[in-house]
Amino acid sequence: MAKDFYQILGVPDTATPPEIKKAYRRLAKQYHPDANPNNPQAAERFKEISEAHTVLSDADQRSKYDRMRKYGAFGGGGAPRPRGGPGAPGPSAGDDGSFDFGDIGLGDIFSSIFGNRTRREEPRGVEALETLVEIPFRVAAMGGKVPVSVTVMEPCGTCHGSGAAPGATVEKCSECNGSGTVTFGQGSFAVHRPCPKCRGKGKIPSQYCGTCAGAGEIRTERRLSVTVPPGTESGTKIRLKGQGHPARDGRPAGDLLVTFQVQADRFFAREGLDLRCEVPINLAQAVYGTTLKVRTLDGKKVVLKVPAGTQPGRTFRIKGIGLEENGRKGDQLITVNVQIPEPPTGESAELFKQYAE
Ligand SMILES: [Zn+2]
Ligand SMILES: [Zn+2]
């Protein structure tokens, strides 16, 4: 179970940076090795406090840590340790039970925060099912839910996995003599394979189940609604515990690993918490100035005043309407593209010629 940095510092997860700093200073003073000579417990505690402060005092690391914490890095099992000041919050993560990053150790938290995450061994369950899900740009940016459908092997409801028709008698397989395995070759060259006649089951029914044709399982499409955390980027993976293949042969149900792929948007591009977009204006608008209504991420419009004499490619910044993460808000950056008209004809052609000269 990973450590809860908020608990270690004895602050709520809504603590402001000054509150975190204050809590850190108080505890660091209390547990500093200089004040506690030859006290390994205090030294250990001091180390924890420093780790917690390192992560929580950096806005970027804190937001990454918060996301992992929120989506279950601390969920399930293990009573919260009575650490920190009175009223220190217990782990609140995993309440909805829909996310579980598994039993992540502190090392994993750090390697994940610092970007060289090592792949963990799968727990001893049914193998995890992996799927790639395309999500719209807006959902990725603002968060939301997306439908996901996966094909899983469900135990057959008719034969309950045995592969035998109801009422059929079951006999030992003659091919493998009930072992479920056949052997080719000899001695150290021997190769063992699941028996093709009984499909590794060691038993043969007098009549196969009509629903699954004896396989004992059927392919089923399962539809899920998956929560997309706000600010999700392409390549972000989430693990949905037990949402993959169902439990089988006494092994627990497998997990579902969802990798998000963010679709490009025709209008917006993301740059950290900022959003970039381009709007066309005509020559007269650039020369005399204009007022534009520009689309924002939440589908509303914002008024942009383009001053007279605006040069092509100029970028305007509207503060605070970009992406939001832990109270920090990005901006929307609007670049104006001045469209050069086709050579005019008639009266305006004369005016343009005069202007050129
Ligand atoms: Zn069946
Ligand atoms: Zn067999």
Image (cartoon, grey):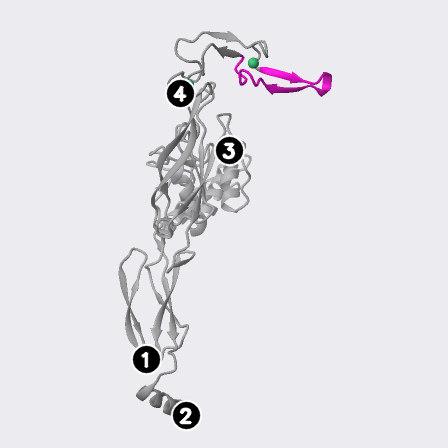
What label does residue 41 carry, if any? 3
Camera-side mark, 2 or 4: 4
- Image quarter where the C terminus lies is bottom left
| Residue 92 in sight | no
Q: Distance between the residues labelled 4 and 3?
A: 62 Å
First in sequence, mark 4 or 3: give its number: 3
Position in image of residue 353 (x %, y %): 38, 90
The residue to which callout 1 is attached is 284
Position in image of residue 329 (x %, y %): 35, 56
Q: Distance between the residues labelled 3 and 2?
A: 84 Å
The residue to which callout 4 is attached is 211
Q: How far apart are marks 2 and 4 (CA)?
A: 85 Å
Determine whether, in the image, residue 297 is placed left or right of residue 150: left
Within 10 Å of disc 1 (Cα), the crowding (few <14, some 14-19, many 20+) is: some
Rendering quadrant holding ligand 1: top left
Q: Distance between the residues labelled 1 and 3?
A: 73 Å
